[in-house]
Image (cartoon, rainbow, N blue to C red):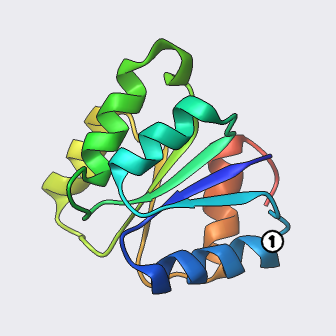
Amino acid sequence: MRVLIVDDSNAMLKVIRVLLAQIGFEEVDEASDGAMALDMLRRGDYGLVISDWSMEPVSGIELLRTVRAEGAWRDLPFIMVTAETRRENLEEARAAGVSEYVLKPFDAPALQRTIARVLGTAG
């Protein structure tokens, strides 16, 4: 399964890529913001998106809303990564159709559990 990770921090992209490799995901592409991610989604076949919330010019929540508005992507598993713990933000992500979210910082087992919940697999 191809995974698209979206974050404006190169360091965080590398961390997520390493964690994904540790849990068996090898086909991983990176986007540095929501606009780039949309272009990549239009050209690629992804089974999972893992996106940071806070990015410019297109934020993770804006990316999520666009993904959910597209018929072909309506059911695409989408995990939001955030350091934000405010209830309003988590509720906003749920209302926008996020599959799951993971709070920073996280490790490989936490990411694996989150992905397993989203994909409906054991983990």
Image height of 115 relative to 120, above or below? below
Q: Which residue is mark 1?
A: 23
Residue in view at x 30 percent, y 75 percent? 83
Name the amino acid type tagged 1. Answer: Ile
Out of 15 and 98, give the one closest to the viewer.
15
Q: Position of residue 106 (x, y in %)?
A: 52, 81
Out of 121 and 62, give the one closest to the viewer.
62
Residue in view at x 46 percent, y 47 percent? 37
Residue in view at x 26 percent, y 63 percent? 55
| Furthest-top residue in this view | 71
Out of 47 and 39, give the one closest to the viewer.
39
Side of 17 relative to 121 (left or right): left
Query: Quarter of the image holding residue 110?
Result: bottom right
Query: Quarter of the image holding residue 56?
Result: bottom left
Q: Residues within 10 Å of mark 1 (few under 14, many from 20)?
A: few
Provide the secondary structure element on which disc 1 rests.
Answer: loop
Residue in view at x 70 percent, y 66 percent? 112
Q: Position of residue 71 (x, y in %)?
A: 48, 13
- Quadrant position of the C terminus in the picture: bottom right
Q: Position of residue 44 (x, y in %)?
A: 66, 36
- The number of numbered discs placed on residues in the rendered structure image is 1
Out of 6 and 105, give the one closest to the viewer.
6
Side of 25 relative to 53 (left or right): right
Side of 93 relative to 81 (left or right): left
Image height of 94 relative to 89, above or below? above
Side of 88 relative to 113 (left or right): left
